[in-house]
Image: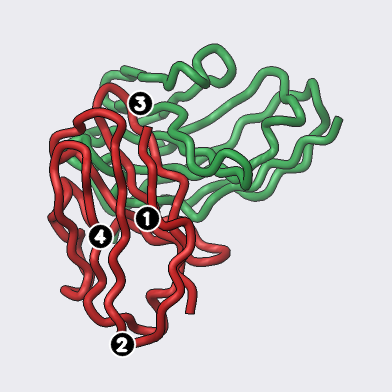
C-alpha cells in the first residue's frame, strides 16, 4: 500500500527556518517524482515543485522558485520542503504528493502539514 | 488558467451532478479531477481527462479535451458531497479554484 506520511504541525515566527518531511513507503520511492502542494483559503491549491529522488532532478514552480528548497533522500525514502526565512504569508497547509507514472496527475497525497507563521 | 463552474452546486442524493472546468488554452487531455472532504487531503478521481483512478466508483466519469472538460457523477451518494478541483499539466501544474457540491 502506497503511503506518504508527513511530519506534524509547525508553529513558527517570521524569520525562522523550517524543514518539513514526507516519508514514502509501499512503492519504489526513487522512481517516482514527488513534490509539494500548498493550500490556503485565499489562493486554493498551488503546485510548488517536484523532485526525482533517483537523480535529484528538481523542478520548481516559478511562484516558489527561490523561496523554498525541495529535496529528497532516496536512502530513507523521505522528501523535504524547507524555508530559510519564513514569512507570515507562508502560513498554509502543505501536502506531499506523488506524481503518477505519466507525469500528469498526483496519484497519492500525504495527510498534510499545517504551518503557522506569526509576525 | 483553469476556471471551474459553478462555484457551488446544490443537489440531492440520487441526482446527477455535472461540473465544468475550462482552460484558458488547450491542455490536450492532461486534465485531472480531485475530491476533497473537510479535514482531508484531496483524492485523485480522474486523470488524463477520462480515466478513473484506482478504486474510484463507476458513477464518476470525466470527459473533454482541449479547453472544455466535465466531471459527471451519475447518482449522488451522501459521501460525494465535497469540493472538487480540476488540475492541468502542460508546462507546469495548476489547479482550478474548486466547485463545492452541497446537499
The residue labelled by disc 3 is A51
Residue A3 is tagged as: 1
Write down the colour of chain A.
green
Which residue is identified by label 4? B71
Total marks in image: 4
Kindly indicate whether the residues beneath marks 2 and 1 are on one polypeptide chain.
no
Compared across the picture, whether A112 is left or right of B10 comes to: right
Q: Which chain is red?
A: B
Q: Residues within 10 Å of mark 3 (few under 14, many from 20)?
A: many
Dot 1 or dot 3, earlier in sequence: 1
Say the numbered circle drawn on residue B63: none
Q: Is residue A28 visible?
A: no
Q: Is residue A113 left or right of residue A3?
A: right
Q: Are marks 3 and 4 in contact (CB under 8 Å)?
A: no
Q: Residues within 10 Å of mark 1 (few under 14, many from 20)?
A: some
The relative height of residue A85 versus residue B51 in the rendered view (above or below) is above
Disc 2 is placed on an element classified as loop
Amino acid at each position: 500500500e502506497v503511503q506518504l506520511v508527513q511530519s506534524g504541525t509547525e508553529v513558527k515566527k517570521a524569520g525562522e527556518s523550517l524543514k518539513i518531511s514526507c516519508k514514502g513507503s509501499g512503492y519504489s520511492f526513487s522512481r517516482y517524482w514527488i513534490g509539494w502542494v500548498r493550500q490556503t483559503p485565499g489562493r486554493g491549491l498551488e503546485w510548488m515543485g517536484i523532485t526525482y529522488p533517483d537523480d535529484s532532478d528538481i523542478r520548481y514552480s516559478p511562484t516558489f522558485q527561490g523561496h523554498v528548497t525541495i529535496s529528497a533522500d532516496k536512502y530513507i525514502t523521505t522528501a523535504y520542503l524547507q524555508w530559510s526565512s519564513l514569512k507570515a504569508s507562508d502560513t498554509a497547509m502543505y501536502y506531499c504528493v506523488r506524481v503518477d507514472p505519466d507525469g500528469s496527475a498526483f496519484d497519492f497525497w500525504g495527510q498534510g502539514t499545517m504551518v503557522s507563521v506569526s509576525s | 488558467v483553469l476556471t471551474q463552474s459553478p462555484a457551488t452546486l446544490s443537489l440531492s442524493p440520487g441526482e446527477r451532478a455535472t461540473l465544468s472546468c475550462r482552460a484558458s488554452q488547450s491542455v490536450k487531455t492532461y486534465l485531472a479531477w480531485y475530491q476533497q472532504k473537510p479535514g482531508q487531503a484531496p483524492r485523485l478521481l480522474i486523470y488524463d481527462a477520462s480515466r478513473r483512478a484506482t478504486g474510484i466508483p463507476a458513477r464518476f466519469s470525466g470527459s473533454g479535451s482541449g479547453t472544455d472538460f466535465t466531471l459527471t457523477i451519475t447518482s449522488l451518494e451522501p459521501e460525494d458531497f465535497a469540493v472538487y478541483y480540476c488540475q492541468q499539466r502542460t508546462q507546469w501544474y495548476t489547479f482550478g479554484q474548486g466547485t463545492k457540491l452541497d446537499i
